[in-house]
Amino acid sequence: MMRSVTVSTAPEPERAARSGPRRATYHHGDLRRALLDASTELAREGGPDAVVVREATRRVGVSANAAYRHFADRDDLLEAVASRAQGQAADVIAESIAAVPDDGVEQSLARRRFRAVGLGYLRFALAEPGLFRTAFGVPVDLSRSGSPEAAGQCGRTPFQLLSDQLDAMVSAGALPPEQREGAELLAWSAVHGFAMLALEGPLRGLPPEAIEHIAPRLVEMVDLGLGLVESPVAGG
Amino acid sequence: MMRSVTVSTAPEPERAARSGPRRATYHHGDLRRALLDASTELAREGGPDAVVVREATRRVGVSANAAYRHFADRDDLLEAVASRAQGQAADVIAESIAAVPDDGVEQSLARRRFRAVGLGYLRFALAEPGLFRTAFGVPVDLSRSGSPEAAGQCGRTPFQLLSDQLDAMVSAGALPPEQREGAELLAWSAVHGFAMLALEGPLRGLPPEAIEHIAPRLVEMVDLGLGLVESPVAGG
DNA sequence: TGTACATCAGTGAACGCGCGTTCACTGATGTAC
DNA sequence: TGTACATCAGTGAACGCGCGTTCACTGATGTAC
C-alpha cells in the first residue's frame, strides 16, 4: 500500500526544450524552468547535496555560468527546488486524504483523514527519498512552510494540510481544543523522525515490510496520544 | 532545564600529545586516538560533513596521509566518530534516567524513566547538534546500534537504554506486553523527528523556549499513545 | 650489553577531481521612431 | 515597413579552492642473537 506512487518531476510541457544537449537557438527560451527541472531531478536522484549548479547546466546543455542569470547562487537554486519538492509532497498527502472513504461518522472520518496526512507523508518519503530529504531536510524556516511556492497543485503546503486536518479533528470532537496548539509539531515529529531513520539513519536497512507494518502503528500512536497529553510536566 | 549539558569530547588524558602543531618526536605515539579526538571535534562543530581527513590531520599536526595508517578511508574514520558520538549520547541519556527520583510507585517510576530516555535524547541533540547529527544521521544499520563501540561509559548504547526502559515498562505493568514489539521504533521516531526538524529542518528558527515547551509534551504523547495502539489498521 | 635488521609509523610531493563563481565578451531580441 | 540601438541572455576561459588518495621515501622502534 505504500509503494506505487508516481510523482511527476516535471508536470509542465517543457520537456521538448531539454531533449538534446545542444539547443537550436542561442537563446534558450525558458532556462529558469529548465534548470529547475534538471535540479529537481538531481535532488530526486541524490538528495540536496546532489543539487549542483554545474551538473544542472550540463544537463540542460548550457554553460555553467548561465545559471547565474536566473539564480543568485547555488543556495537560491536549492531553495527553489526544496519548495517545489514540498509542493509535490503536498500533492501526495492531499491524494492520501482524498482517498479516505466517508463512512458518515464525522469523528471517525476526521481521525482517518488525519492519519492519512501522516501516511501520505511517509508514502512520499519512501517513494521519493531524494526529494523528501530536499523538501524537509534543507534548513528553511517555518515561515516558508506556509508560502505559496511550497504549495502543490492542490494549493496547500504539507504543513497547511496537516493544520487543516487538526482543525477538522477539533471541529469533529476528536481532539480537545486545549490540545490543539502546537499539535502540528508533535504529529510532524513522529512521522518525520520515522522517515529520517528509515531513509538515512540507522533504520536504513529495514525491510519494506517492516516499514509498512510500522507506519500505521505510528500514526495511530500519534492520533491516540495527542488527545491525552496533559499540561506540561515540570522537571525531567 | 535542557541547556547546561557538558559533553566531554576527549575524556582520556591524551591531550598533552596534541598541544602543539609540531610533535617533539617523529612518532606520534597515539595517532589513532588523536585523529579520533580531532575528528570528533570537527563533527561537534559542523556535523558529519565537517569530518574531513585533511583537516583532522592538520589539527593533530601530522601529514594528511598519515591518517591512512589508522583508518582505511574517510568513511572508516567517520564511522568511528559516529560510534563515539552515540556513546556520548548514551551517557547523557543514562544520566537523565538516573536523575529520575524514585517515588516508590513502580509504574510511575517506569513511566518517568521511559520519558527520561526521550528527554535525554533531545537534550543531547540540542546541546550537541553536530555530534547528534553525526551519531544518528550517518547511515549505519541497526545491527551496529547494539555494538560495544557505540556504547557509552555506562556500557550501553542509546538504543539499548531505550529497550531497557521499555522492558521495565512492561514489567511494571505500564505497557501491555502485546504492544512491546517494535515500540523502540515508534518512540525513537518521535524524538528523532523533533530533533531533526529543530536542528536542520524547517523548525530551525524555533526559539529555545518553544522547544523546551514541546519536548515534555512529545514524550508524554508517546508514553500515552504507545499503550493504546491496537492491531494495525488495514488500508489508509 | 651490543648490534643487525625487519618492521612500523611517519613524511613530502603530487595527481586528478569537481566545485562555485567571476570576468569580459557576443549573439539575439524587441522597441522607438 | 525599415532601421538604430539598448537590453537581455547567453558563451568561453579562467581562478582559486579543498578534497581524498597514492607514491616512493625515511626516521624510529623493538627484537633476535
Image (spheres, coloured by chain):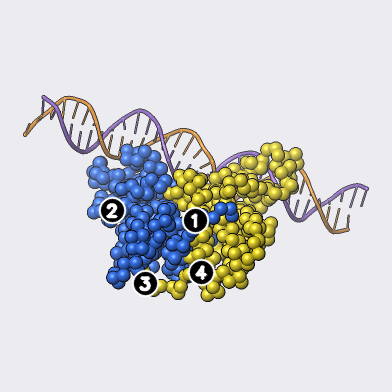
Chain colours: A blue, B yellow, C purple, D orange
Instruction: Residue type at mark 1: give it.
Output: Ser
Q: Are marks 4 and 1 on the same chain?
A: no
Q: Are marks 4 and 3 on the same chain?
A: yes
The residue under the point 50% across, 67% down is: B226
Q: Residues within 10 Å of mark 4 (few under 14, many from 20)?
A: some
Q: As displayed, is residue B192 above or below residue B167?
A: above
Which image quarter holds the C terminus of chain B?
Answer: bottom left
The disc, 4 or 3, on the residue closer to the chain's N-terminal end is 4
Check whether the beta carbons of the residues at disc 4 and disc 2 lie within 8 A of each other.
no
Q: Say whether disc 2 or disc 1 marks the residue closer to the N-terminus.
A: 2
Chain bearing tag 4 is B
Secondary structure beneath disc 2?
loop
Q: Which residue is mark 2?
A: A155
Q: Look at 38% across and 68% down and name the residue there.
A: A2
For disc 3, the marked residue is B235
Give the residue type that dot 2 points to.
Gly
**Which percent across, then down, holds residue A189?**
46, 57
Give me the C-alpha separation between circle 4 and circle 2. Answer: 37 Å
> Mark 2 belongs to which subunit?
A
The residue to which callout 1 is attached is: A231
- Asked whether the beta carbons under mark 2 and mark 3 sit within 8 Å of each other, the answer is no
Q: CA distance from mark 4 to mark 3?
A: 22 Å
> Residue at image x 52%, y 63%?
B223
Q: Are marks 4 and 2 on the same chain?
A: no
What kind of residue is marked 3?
Answer: Gly
Q: Nearer the viewer, mark 4 or mark 2?
A: 4
The x, y position of residue A208, in whole percent, is 45, 69
**Residue B116 in picture, x, y percent from top left:** 59, 58
User: Callout 2: 10 Å neighbours few (<14), some, many (20+)?
Assistant: some
Callout 3: helix, strand or loop? loop
Q: What distance separates the C-alpha of mark 3 from that of mark 1?
A: 34 Å
| Nearer the observer, A107 or A223 | A107
